[in-house]
């Protein structure tokens, strides 16, 4: 169990809850550590938790029967994922994998559903989250089918810095170029070249430990 105070630091949406609701949400949440490459859940698992990234970064994706890996989204700190499977009471349609050593908050399904049934603030947040998530997946399909490597890197970064999905990220994200390449479904060489070009365009700054964003809107609309 985590504290309500700690929950507010890893889940900005919890600030929209009443004090009593936040306390109940915290009581129904634990935090676990995962090493790089660990599976938080596998496709087909019935995982009765809603997952939030406290530190690190995780990848949501799947592998086809022919061995092709498909990435749906990268989730940085303050991002939460898996609400659809909890609401629909279905097995997971994807894998969640730690791209680096990460700490993940796991909210019990019963707690999630209690908030869904009783909290106005939580429901407002869920509507915004699901609407933004739909936009993210539509944009991902368009990006994969229409844009070159540089645009795919730019738009992937734009989503990682999305203030609705990941309000705690701010302007800096600790991520390696190898991790970004995995999220984009590109080779490390193409991802590195694309980052240099985006940096030359003034959209980002590549730091020793991560990436500083200079123009979120420019990244999100890159190539349009």
Image: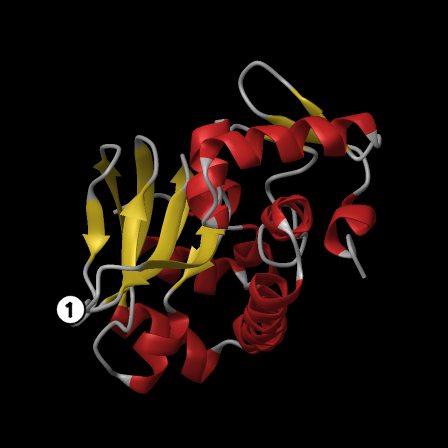
Residue behind mark 1: 45
17 relative position to 105: left or right? right
**Residue 192 lies in quadrant:** top right
Q: Of 145 and 86, which appears nearest the observer? A: 145
**Residue 129 lies in quadrant:** bottom right
Residue 124 locus on image (x, y percent)? 61, 75
Q: Is mark 1 on a helix, strand or loop?
A: loop
Q: Of 216 and 87, which appears nearest the observer? A: 216
Residue 132 locus on image (x, y percent)? 62, 69
Q: Can residue 6 be seen in this view?
A: no
Residue 117 locus on image (x, y percent)? 42, 84
Residue furthest top in the image: 208
Taking 145 as reference, is 177 above or below it? Answer: above
26 relative position to 162: left or right? left
Residue 3 locus on image (x, y percent)? 36, 43
Q: Residue at image x 54%, y 77%?
A: 123
Q: Is residue 186 visible?
A: yes
């Amino acid at each position: 169990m985590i504290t309500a105070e700690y929950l507010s630091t890893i889940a900005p949406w919890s600030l929209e809850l009443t004090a009593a609701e936040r306390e109940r949400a915290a009581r129904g949440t634990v935090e676990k550590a995962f090493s790089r490459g660990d599976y938080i859940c596998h496709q087909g698992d019935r995982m009765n938790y809603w997952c939030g990234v406290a530190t690190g970064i995780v990848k949501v994706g799947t592998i086809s029967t022919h061995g092709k890996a498909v990435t749906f989204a990268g989730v940085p700190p303050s991002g939460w994922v898996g609400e659809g499977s909890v609401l629909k009471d279905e097995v997971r349609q994807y894998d969640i994998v730690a791209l680096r050593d990460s700490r993940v908050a796991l909210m019990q399904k019963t707690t999630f559903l209690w908030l869904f049934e009783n909290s106005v603030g939580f429901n407002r947040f869920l509507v915004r989250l699901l609407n933004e998530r739909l936009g993210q997946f539509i944009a991902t399909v368009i990006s994969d089918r229409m844009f070159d490597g540089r645009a795919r890197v730019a738009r992937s970064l734009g989503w990682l810095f999305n203030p609705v999905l990941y309000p705690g990220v701010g302007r800096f994200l600790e991520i390696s170029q190898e991790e970004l390449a995995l999220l984009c479904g590109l080779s490390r060489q193409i991802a590195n070249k694309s980052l240099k070009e985006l940096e030359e365009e003034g959209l980002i700054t590549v730091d020793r430990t991560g990436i500083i964003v200079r123009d979120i809107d420019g990244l999100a609309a890159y190539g349009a």
